[in-house]
């Protein structure tokens, strides 16, 4: 994946330098916070507050005031051909003619996405990066072209002022290595009293093989007027912060995290900047938010916008199933740790048990949401992939303990012992759901596969027996994190271990003793006793992960979801305070935050926690618990 970014490409010599990887993941966010120059229209430092309204998933409206009583509105839009366009209007509200200075910047670098990971695999290793060279040339007097000859990418840019093409003849050629270009063009536009100046800047990123049509994508005045006037909310209860979080995380998935690979295939990535890869785990929960939105759409979205969202959600969910079952490569029969959008595995052959479950669960959820698409689901089943994955799972089955081995945890960390608790909860649910799917489709699992309902029952029995144990320090019964199936265990809980949270909801634990063991496990996870998983260093401390210090937004989600399951109002409000503090200005979430300030410390945009929080907010709205987050009584 190629990015046009206002900062340098990842340093290819530092893939295993974890502090550098973590810092680079926040480069975009830091650039915004430090007001670093990027590319596009620039009216100077704005002293007043900037109003930002995200109207559609592809349209944002910025409003601010400049000296001399000038009001500026900028519509930033991604248009159908993939171009990014800025439409600016500067209105002179004063009584005198003014000369408004403006700048056009092209501080940009064409970078290959680094795909740098905190848990970089040593087998196979990082994906080699091409040389970073940015060459600025003029296609003609009115069009600038940036090219990285080693990447096979080019960026075209043009500027119109009051409908006239800007003349770039004085812009000199420029070449940079391992750094963005530094291009600044300035001008002045005369605006009589009561009149408006219009400026349009466009940027289009293409491969070297694609031809660029000379078109600045000028937005017709009537359409621009409509956008500037249109304040009609698309979502119900639009004034609530919870609605903003839900809406923005749904839109983030639809607009930034879905990549059409073909007419029928859609890849889903977890973020659009730092690590644009697909994980079955993350993608499963992302699609789940979309399906939950679709299932409750009349309670969430105003009628005139329902069809728009329904069509997008169905296309993405269906396209991703087709991608994961037919395009995602499985050289050894199982799904890999993570994927490039072309379906190629990013990492070498490492077996993660939970990653095998999510596409199957996603298929079951899809049919629940779209029962009329039964023939499509049958077509996916006819590929034989499900049976192949079941065969791989059987090869990981330890007949002595009845457990299933994994090589890594859901946090991409190597295991000390081969059997991992939350992955077994998820596998049990997968067997149950897949059994129901076979019955719904009137299909037979095959002679080589035992009855799935029997497999689920046996797995639950063996899991409860092997993982339920007493933690010596406190004497409480709880579920171990890892076990060898005999006597050796580890006690830990991680923000990535979502299935443990859902063990009660899914009825994996049902008896009073089982529920108590589960409750003890969760309470341990949210306490300093979980010494390598819980961050207790500030007011925004919380559940995190062993390989990334700080509190994780996934941990905040778990905290809110557990409090909601216990109907604990003070705990719900406390968790919501952390979530609100950690939220980015655009309603999305980072991976990890500083426990003292709640500011991002790793991966500024990360769709998975936002998907979890969004789906939870839907449930809390439906069952009335959202009122607790708003500080209202539910009595």
Image: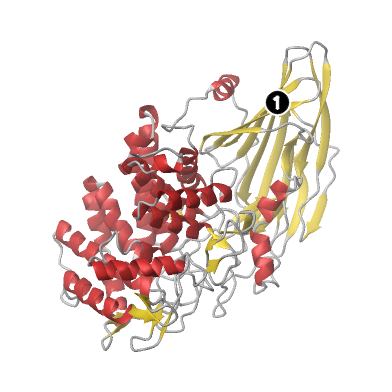
- Disc 1 designates what residue? 72
Image: 567 above or below 499: above
Q: Relative to the observer, which residue lies in front, 599 or 177? A: 599
The x, y position of residue 510, in whole percent, is 23, 65
Q: Relative to the observer, which residue lies in front, 563 or 548? A: 563
Q: Relative to the observer, which residue lies in front, 322 or 29? A: 29
Check the picture and name the quadrant holding the C terminus: top left
Q: Residue at x 83, y 12 (%)?
A: 96
The x, y position of residue 235, in whole percent, is 43, 33
Q: Residue at x 77, y 19 (%)?
A: 69
Q: Relative to the observer, which residue lies in front, 406 or 211? A: 406
Q: Is residue 541 left or right of residue 199?
A: left
Residue 503 location, quadrant: bottom left
Image: 96 above or below 359: above
Q: Residue at x 83, y 26 (%)?
A: 188
Q: Residue at x 49, y 79 (%)?
A: 414
Q: Is residue 118 left or right of residue 353?
A: right
Check the picture and name the quadrant holding the N terminus: bottom right
Look at the image and tell me whether residue 545 can be seen: yes
């Amino acid at each position: 994946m190629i990015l046009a970014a206002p900062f340098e490409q990842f340093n290819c010599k530092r893939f295993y330098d974890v502090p550098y990887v973590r810092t680079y993941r926040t480069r975009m966010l830091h650039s915004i916070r430090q007001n670093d120059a990027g590319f596009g229209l620039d009216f100077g430092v704005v002293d007043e507050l900037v109003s930002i309204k995200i109207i559609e998933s592809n349209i944002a409206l910025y409003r601010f005031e400049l000296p001399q009583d000038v009001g500026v509105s900028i519509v930033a839009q991604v248009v159908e051909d993939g171009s990014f366009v800025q439409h600016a209007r500067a209105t002179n509200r004063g009584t005198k003619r003014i000369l408004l200075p403006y700048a056009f910047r092209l501080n940009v670098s064409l970078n290959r996405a680094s795909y740098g990971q905190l848990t970089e695999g040593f087998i196979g290793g990082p994906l080699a990066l091409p040389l970073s060279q940015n060459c600025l040339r003029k296609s003609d007097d009115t069009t600038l072209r940036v090219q990285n000859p080693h990447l096979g990418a080019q960026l075209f840019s043009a500027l119109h002022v009051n409908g006239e093409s800007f003349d770039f003849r004085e812009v000199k050629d420029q070449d940079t290595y391992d750094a963005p270009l530094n291009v600044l063009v300035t001008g002045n536009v005369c605006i009589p009293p009561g009149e408006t100046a219009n400026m349009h800047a466009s940027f289009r990123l293409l491969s070297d093989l694609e031809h660029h049509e000379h078109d600045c994508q000028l937005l017709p005045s009537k359409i621009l007027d409509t956008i500037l006037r249109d304040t009609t909310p698309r979502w119900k209860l639009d004034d609530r912060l919870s609605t903003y979080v839900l809406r923005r995380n749904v839109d983030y998935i639809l607009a930034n995290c879905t990549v059409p690979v073909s007419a029928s295939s859609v890849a889903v990535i977890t973020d659009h900047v730092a690590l644009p890869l697909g994980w079955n785990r993350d993608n499963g929960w992302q699609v789940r938010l979309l399906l939950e939105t679709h299932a409750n759409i009349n309670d969430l979205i105003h009628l005139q916008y329902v069809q728009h969202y329904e069509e997008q959600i169905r296309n993405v969910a269906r396209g991703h199933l087709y991608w994961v079952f037919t395009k995602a490569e499985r050289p050894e029969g199982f799904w890999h740790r993570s994927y490039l959008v072309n379906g190629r595995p990013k990492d070498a052959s490492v077996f993660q048990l939970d990653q095998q479950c999510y596409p199957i669960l996603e298929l079951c959820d899809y049919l629940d949401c779209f029962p009329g698409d039964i023939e499509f689901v049958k077509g996916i089943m006819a590929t034989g992939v499900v049976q192949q994955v079941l065969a791989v799972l059987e090869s990981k089955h330890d007949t002595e303990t009845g457990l299933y081995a994994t090589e890594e945890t859901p946090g991409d960390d190597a295991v000390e012992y081969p059997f991992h608790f939350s992955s077994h909860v998820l596998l049990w649910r997968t067997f149950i759901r897949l059994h129901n799917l076979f019955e719904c489709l009137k299909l037979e699992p095959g002679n080589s596969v035992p009855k799935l309902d029997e497999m689920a029952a046996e797995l639950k029995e063996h899991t409860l027996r092997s993982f339920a144990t007493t933690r010596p320090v406190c004497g409480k019964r709880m579920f171990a994190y890892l076990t060898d199936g005999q006597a050796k265990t580890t006690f830990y809980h991680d923000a990535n271990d979502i299935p443990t949270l859902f063990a009660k909801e899914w009825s994996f634990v049902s008896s009073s003793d089982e529920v108590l063991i589960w409750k003890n496990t969760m309470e341990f996870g949210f306490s300093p006793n979980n010494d390598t998983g819980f961050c207790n260093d500030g007011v925004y401390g919380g559940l995190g992960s062993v390989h990334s210090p700080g509190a994780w937004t996934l941990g905040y989600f778990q905290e809110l979801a557990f409090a909601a399951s216990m109907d604990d109002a003070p705990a719900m409000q406390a968790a919501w305070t952390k979530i609100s503090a950690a939220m980015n200005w655009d309603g999305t979430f980072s991976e990890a935050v500083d426990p003292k300030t709640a500011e991002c410390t790793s991966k500024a945009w990360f769709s998975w926690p936002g998907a979890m929080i969004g789906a939870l907010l839907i449930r809390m709205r439906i069952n009335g618990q959202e009122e607790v987050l708003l500080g209202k009584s539910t009595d």
